[in-house]
């Protein structure tokens, strides 16, 4: 859509939002209590107050929760009222709400996060790779990037921390961290519910949500409890163009090619459906009971359990030209449309169980001990058509079985008035099984492989916040980490019949190894409170991404590892200001990456795609980000954000162009997952319709530049303009909302992996949904 049309959208929307009389501000979404476990929020009916409210964060792991404006790091936080106002369904819903952040789903397997922050991200769905961005649920680190982008609900807050988090968190992360905090059981009886229905309208099926929570004191002053249930049924947004548009124009060459392959003995078949159908169907069910013991003085015990299941169609893979503009001879779509054609619906079937126990013991007003124990089991079984054509060229089945346990013990204490100490230890243990089956050319070629891994991590950390004066303080931190991984890997090309890596001896088991890593990650920071409305800070932080092994090893000449750790040094300076009725936060940073870990995806004539994981280069990324919130009146808030990234390779150690030599052509390539510009603008308006009815209106526009996907820059991710809007009527206990997402119907992909000439060239990328309209009804009693 051209700029003139966008300006019309803005003009009409602004007039609609600012019409009417102003409404007085209500109570903000604040917090009470002595620490993170005691955090509570109040209901906020005004969307203006929700967006402009005080948000507390847990990311500093201090003695008490803190206002996000007082935290000396780049963090964007969303409270429960803000998440409701944004109709947040999963983490990907927030991907365009934070500068220099992409919370994307890889798409080839449902719920797999390929998150990127400040240009540091990954391009893979295999669980043996540690993500650059760590995800933590109620303090528990999620050990793999699968099962991360599933539905979220009943949340207290989401915090997005940008930059390496190498001190306080359970696992080192080089890009950043995303913290998900669920609501605890209430002190008084409470019932909440929400139902929603949405669709892309013409040619799209419905998508239905129902969620409810009931909680309160079970035994007064002894035990509070809550039960939350969530259900989603998606009838499929996409039309499955099996043999769709443009196929007729390619019929002659396709027919000749298919006939030739069939004559050579390849069992190629064309799927001929009777009619078009909705694609992308899924069902999700989640149950989450939680319990809080309140009977013991100075001790808070919180237990959260969650069981979830989700299943549905496989990925909606679109075959389209990559940066080389070479179309697939069998089927090729325009990458800026939602056209696609697959030979099989495929499927995904995910299930998980997790248990998180948190205990906080207050040893007086200035000391507390916190324990967080976490266990999670996750299973995933998927099948997808990875060639994205109406022919059986490249199908794959992926199976993951993961079990993790973690324990964190933390001491927070104040020494006098000047020093706050955080000391702790962390243990993490994980078992992973991964099995991959590839069927090439109708099953004429069959490959099976994967691996199993046992790993353990031990960390000891400490941080001191020292007040040198009333306005000046220094932050010193240090973490020691020791990690060990033991693997048995079965190379894909060595297993041409069905086998299962979970069964010892079933597959080739041609590679077995064990390796350990240890490192120290320091942090030095300085904070200067210029005045009560202006804080400035500067810091140097080191983060380390764990070394490891490649479960997707597909060639005899390619060793599956080990690859070494990735080290990131981040130099950052910023300020947080609240001039008048505005909030302005800004940061500038330089990130130095040594031994950059990359998942290099290249076309392969035999196995379809080969993945190599190596420490490819050293690089430098420079950037800045600005976020602003401006209270124009009691009834109107304007939000804005801007992010910029510029990155270059300093030294390249791997042949990224795959031309046989390492030269200036490799160094000149762009760093994958790095979008130069991200920016957004939002308007939120509240109108007092009557003494009992409040109307809230919201519109936001966000932009993200195109980014390269593959290391050789042959694949890329589209630029994206997201225009969302909503209008709601609040009747006190009940709120009705109409909303629209992606009004410009922009096309986005989870990836862009190149196919070889044997499969007709082209690039494969999983489509995300386009324009969606929805209705939501929310009640709280």
Image (cartoon, rainbow, N blue to C red):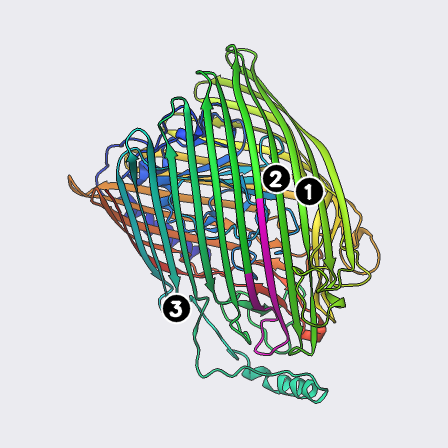
Where is the N terminus found, in terms of image quarters? bottom left
Quarter of the image where the C terminus is located: top left
Q: Main secondary structure of the magenta part?
A: strand
Question: Is residue 705 among what the camera can see?
Answer: yes
Label 2 neighbour load within 10 Å: few <14, some 14-19, many 20+: many
Choose top left, top right, bottom left or bottom right for residue 420: top right
The residue lying toward the viewer, choosing from 215 and 686, is 215
Task: Point out residue 363 in the picture as x, y percentages from the top left corner.
Answer: 46, 18
Note whether 85 is above or below 585 in the view shown: below
Look at the numbered disc 1 and give the secondary structure of its residue.
loop
- Is residue 436 toward the left or the right of residue 179 in the image? right
Which residues are drawn in magenta? 381-404
In depth, the one of 568 and 407 nearer the eye is 407
742 lies above or below 165: below
Judging by the rendered image, the residue that carries numbered circle 3 is 204
Residue topped by disc 1: 546
Q: Position of residue 207 (x, y in %)?
A: 37, 62
Position of residue 76 in the picture relative to residue 649 (left or right): left
Q: Quadrant of residue 557?
A: bottom right
* Left or right of residue 353, residue 196 in this image: left
Q: Badge 1 local density, few (<14 within 10 Å), some, or many (20+)?
A: many
Q: Secondary structure at mark 2?
A: strand
- Residue under numbered circle 2: 428
Q: Residue furthest right?
A: 661
User: Which residue shows up at 69% across the image and 83% down it?
Assistant: 266
Of pointers 1 and 3, the one earlier in the residue sequence: 3
Along the line of sight, the residue nearer the viewer: 420 or 698: 420
Q: From the viewer's perspective, is 713 left or right of 207?
A: right
């Amino acid at each position: 859509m051209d700029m003139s049309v966008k300006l019309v959208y803005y003009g009409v929307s602004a007039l609609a939002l600012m019409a009417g009389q102003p409404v007085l501000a209500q109570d903000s979404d604040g917090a009470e209590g002595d620490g993170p476990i005691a955090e509570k929020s109040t209901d906020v009916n005004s969307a203006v107050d929700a967006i402009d409210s005080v948000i507390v964060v847990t990311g500093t792991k201090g003695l008490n929760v803190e206002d996000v404006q007082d935290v000396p790091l780049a963090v964007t936080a969303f409270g429960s009222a803000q998440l409701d106002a944004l109709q947040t369904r999963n983490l990907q819903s927030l991907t365009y709400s934070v500068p220099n952040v992409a919370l994307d789903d890889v798409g080839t397997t449902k719920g797999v996060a390929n998150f990127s922050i400040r240009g540091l991200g990954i391009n893979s769905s295999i669980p043996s790779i540690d993500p650059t961005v760590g995800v933590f649920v109620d303090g528990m680190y999620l050990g793999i990037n699968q099962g991360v982008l599933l539905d979220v609900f009943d949340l207290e807050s989401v915090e997005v921390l940008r930059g390496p988090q190498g001190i306080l968190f359970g696992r080192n992360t080089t890009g950043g961290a995303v913290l998900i905090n669920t609501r605890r059981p209430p002190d008084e009886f409470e019932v909440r519910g929400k139902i929603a229905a949405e669709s892309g309208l013409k040619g799209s099926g419905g998508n239905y949500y129902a969620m409810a929570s009931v909680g309160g004191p079970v035994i007064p002053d002894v035990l509070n409890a809550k039960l939350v249930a969530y259900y989603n049924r998606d009838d499929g947004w996409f039309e499955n163009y099996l043999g769709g548009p443009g196929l007729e124009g390619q019929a002659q060459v396709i027919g000749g090619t298919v006939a030739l392959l069939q004559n050579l003995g390849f069992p190629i078949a064309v799927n001929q459906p009777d009619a078009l159908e909705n694609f992308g169907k899924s069902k999700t069910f989640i149950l989450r009971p939680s319990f809080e013991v309140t009977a013991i003085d100075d001790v808070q015990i919180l237990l959260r359990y969650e069981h979830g299941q989700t299943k549905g169609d496989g990925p909606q893979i679109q075959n389209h030209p990559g940066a080389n503009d070479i179309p697939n001879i069998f089927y090729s779509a325009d990458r800026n449309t939602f056209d696609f054609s697959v030979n099989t619906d495929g499927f995904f079937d995910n299930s998980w169980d997790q248990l998180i126990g948190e205990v906080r013991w207050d040893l007086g007003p200035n000391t507390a001990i916190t324990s967080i124990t976490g266990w999670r089991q996750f299973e995933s079984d998927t099948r997808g058509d990875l060639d994205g054509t109406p022919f059986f060229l490249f199908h794959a089945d992926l199976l993951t079985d993961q079990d993790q346990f973690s324990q964190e013990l933390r001491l927070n204490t104040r020494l006098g008035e000047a020093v706050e100490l955080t000391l702790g230890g962390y243990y993490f243990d994980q078992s992973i099984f991964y099995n991959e089956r590839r069927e090439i050319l109708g099953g004429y070629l069959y490959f099976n492989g994967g691996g199993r891994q046992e790993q353990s991590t031990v960390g000891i950390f400490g941080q001191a916040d020292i007040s040198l004066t009333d306005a000046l303080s220094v932050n010193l931190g240090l973490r020691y980490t020791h990690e060990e991984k033991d693997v048995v890997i079965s190379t894909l090309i060595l297993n041409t019949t069905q086998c299962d890596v979970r069964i010892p001896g079933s597959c080739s088991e041609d590679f077995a190894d064990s390796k350990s890593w240890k490192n120290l990650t320091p942090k030095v920071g300085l904070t200067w409170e210029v005045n009560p409305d202006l804080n400035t800070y500067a810091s140097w932080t080191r983060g380390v991404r764990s070394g490891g092994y490649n479960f997707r090893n597909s060639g005899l000449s390619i060793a599956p590892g080990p690859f070494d750790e990735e080290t990131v040094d981040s130099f950052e300076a910023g300020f947080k200001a609240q001039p008048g009725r505005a909030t302005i936060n800004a940061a500038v940073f330089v990130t130095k990456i040594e031994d950059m870990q990359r998942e290099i995806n290249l076309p392969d004539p035999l196995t379809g795609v080969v993945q190599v994981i190596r420490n490819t280069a050293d690089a430098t990324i420079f950037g800045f980000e600005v976020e602003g919130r401006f209270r124009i009146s009691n009834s109107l808030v304007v939000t804005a954000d801007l992010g910029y990234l510029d990155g270059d390779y300093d030294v390249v150690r791997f042949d990224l162009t795959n031309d046989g030599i390492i030269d200036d052509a490799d160094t000149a390539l762009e760093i994958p997952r790095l979008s130069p510009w991200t920016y957004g603008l939002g308007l939120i308006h509240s109108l007092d319709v009557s003494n009992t009815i409040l109307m809230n209106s919201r519109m936001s526009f966000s932009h993200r530049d195109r980014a390269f996907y593959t290391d050789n820059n042959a694949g890329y991710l589209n630029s994206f303009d997201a225009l969302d809007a909503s209008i709601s009527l609040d009747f006190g206990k009940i709120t009705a909302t109409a909303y629209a997402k992606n009004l410009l119907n922009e096309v986005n992909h989870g990836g862009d992996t190149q196919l070889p000439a044997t499969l007709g060239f082209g690039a494969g990328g999983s489509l995300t949904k386009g324009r969606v309209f929805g209705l939501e009804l929310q009640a709280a009693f």
